[in-house]
Image (tube, rainbow, N blue to C red):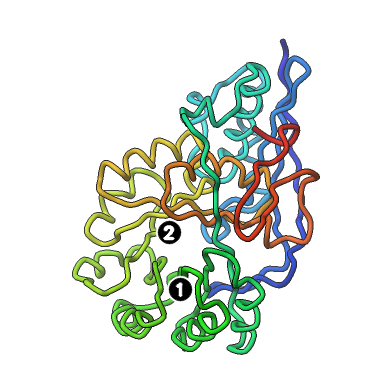
């Protein structure tokens, strides 16, 4: 049967401006793709990697380059050879997984080799704000098992202390988004230890990772912006204890599963994360989450709108999207 490809831009409104060390966003701009074959529709969605220059326009241009191959029946393994890692490949890979599931009647998670599905609990993110607002926001979400606290270079201790006052029992991830130096890390790690922080995410700029090789602080650290594909792993060994795998960066679940296996073999512990985007962009990450200790898949939770019958978040626990949407 003939296959057709449809691709378009979309913008999801956020509940509030999302502020991190790199800047502020008020909407999630994504690309949505649909592959139609034999009366079925496979969907994919991605916001790409903005800090590496990806935009909806650049992703759509990449998708158009491989349209002939996709419409001739290209599979996921062939797609790995046709496009580089990034958002365009993530959207197309997700659509292929979804289409395969619909054509075979076998859900994506089973096709990915997950023997027993476990509930997925996601951290929810508190973006940069004033100290009083950190505490107030944490108090609103104090019943969530994990909170992720975005901080900048200045006053992370005050921000984390405020969150801890508001949510005394939540486990905490602190994410500096590359804004610290190695010296900042050493100082801040010691300051943050009394607040029960479980993980520090990407404290230093990507490319400066070797400066972490003699870090022996009390809180484990996780690579995020420093990791896109398995080719990056060798440079991170001895510098990080965790790696955060994001499918927008790996170029989809197919490559993400391969990266997870390679990361475990290299001795890393696993976290799965996401960019901003709706339920279709995040749902493949829920499959990868079955292998991960820490999950941060709150993109749709940060939005004021989403796919109909998309992922629901109840005190951090994620529901699978309705089968009609993905998977």
* Residue nearest the viewer, comparing 76 with 195: 195
Tell me where residue 303 appears, x and y as whole percent: 72, 60
Please say whether residue 160 is visible from this viewpoint: yes
Please give left or right for residue 230 compared with residue 106 in the image.
left
Q: Dot 1, crowdedness within 10 Å: few (<14), some or many (≥20)?
A: many
**Mark 2 closeness class: few <14, some 14–19, many ≥20 residues within 10 Å:** many
Residue 68 in percent (x, y) is at 65, 23
Q: Position of residue 109 (x, y in %)?
A: 54, 31
Q: Residue furthest top?
A: 1
Q: Residue at x 58, y 29 (%)?
A: 108
Mark 1 — residue?
Answer: 176
Q: Which mark is residue 224?
A: 2
Which of the 4 image quarters holds residue 240? Answer: bottom left
- Label 2 and label 1: CA atoms lie apart by 11 Å
User: Looking at the image, is 89 positioned above or below residue 11?
Assistant: above
Q: Secondary structure at mark 1?
A: loop
Residue at coordinates 49% horizontally, 45% vertically from top-left? 289
Query: Which residue is found at the position 73% from the left and 71% from the top?
Result: 16
Query: 136 or 157: nearer the eye?
Result: 136
- Residue toward you, 212 or 280: 280
- Asked whether the viewer can see residue 69, the reply is no
Where disc 2 sits, the SS reads loop
**What is the quadrant of the C terminus in the image?**
top right
Q: Earlier in the sequence, mark 2 or mark 1?
A: 1
């Amino acid at each position: 049967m003939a296959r057709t490809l449809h691709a378009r831009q979309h913008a999801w409104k956020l509940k509030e401006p999302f502020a991190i060390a790199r800047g502020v966003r008020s909407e999630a701009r994504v690309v949505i793709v649909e592959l139609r074959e034999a009366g079925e529709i496979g969907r994919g969605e991605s916001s790409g990697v903005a800090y590496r220059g990806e935009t909806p326009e650049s992703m759509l241009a990449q998708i158009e380059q491989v349209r002939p191959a996709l419409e001739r029946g290209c599979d996921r393994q062939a797609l790995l050879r046709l496009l580089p890692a990034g958002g365009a490949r993530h959207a197309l890979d997700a659509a292929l997984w979804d289409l395969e599931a619909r054509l075979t009647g076998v859900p994506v998670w089973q096709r990915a080799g997950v023997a027993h599905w476990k509930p997925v609990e996601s951290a929810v993110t508190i973006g940069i704000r004033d100290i009083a607002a950190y505490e107030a926001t944490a108090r609103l979400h104090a019943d969530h098992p994990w909170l992720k606290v975005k901080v900048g270079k200045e006053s992370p201790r005050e921000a984390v202390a405020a969150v801890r006052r508001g949510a005394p029992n939540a486990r905490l991830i602190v994410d500096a988004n590359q804004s610290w130096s190695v010296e900042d890390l050493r100082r801040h790690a010691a300051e943050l230890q009394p607040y029960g922080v479980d993980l520090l995410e990407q404290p230093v700029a990507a490319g400066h990772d070797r400066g972490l090789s003699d870090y022996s602080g009390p809180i484990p650290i996780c690579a995020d912006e420093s990791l896109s594909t398995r080719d990056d792993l060798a440079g991170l060994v001895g510098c990080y204890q965790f790696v955060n795998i994001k499918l927008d960066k790996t170029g989809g679940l197919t490559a993400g599963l391969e990266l997870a296996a390679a990361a475990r073999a290299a001795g890393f512990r696993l976290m799965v994360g996401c960019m901003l985007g709706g339920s279709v962009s995040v749902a493949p990450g829920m499959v990868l989450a079955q292998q991960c200790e820490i999950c941060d898949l709150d993109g749709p939770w940060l939005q004021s709108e989403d796919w109909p019958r998309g992922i629901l978040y109840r005190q951090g626990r994620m529901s699978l999207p309705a089968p009609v949407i993905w998977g």
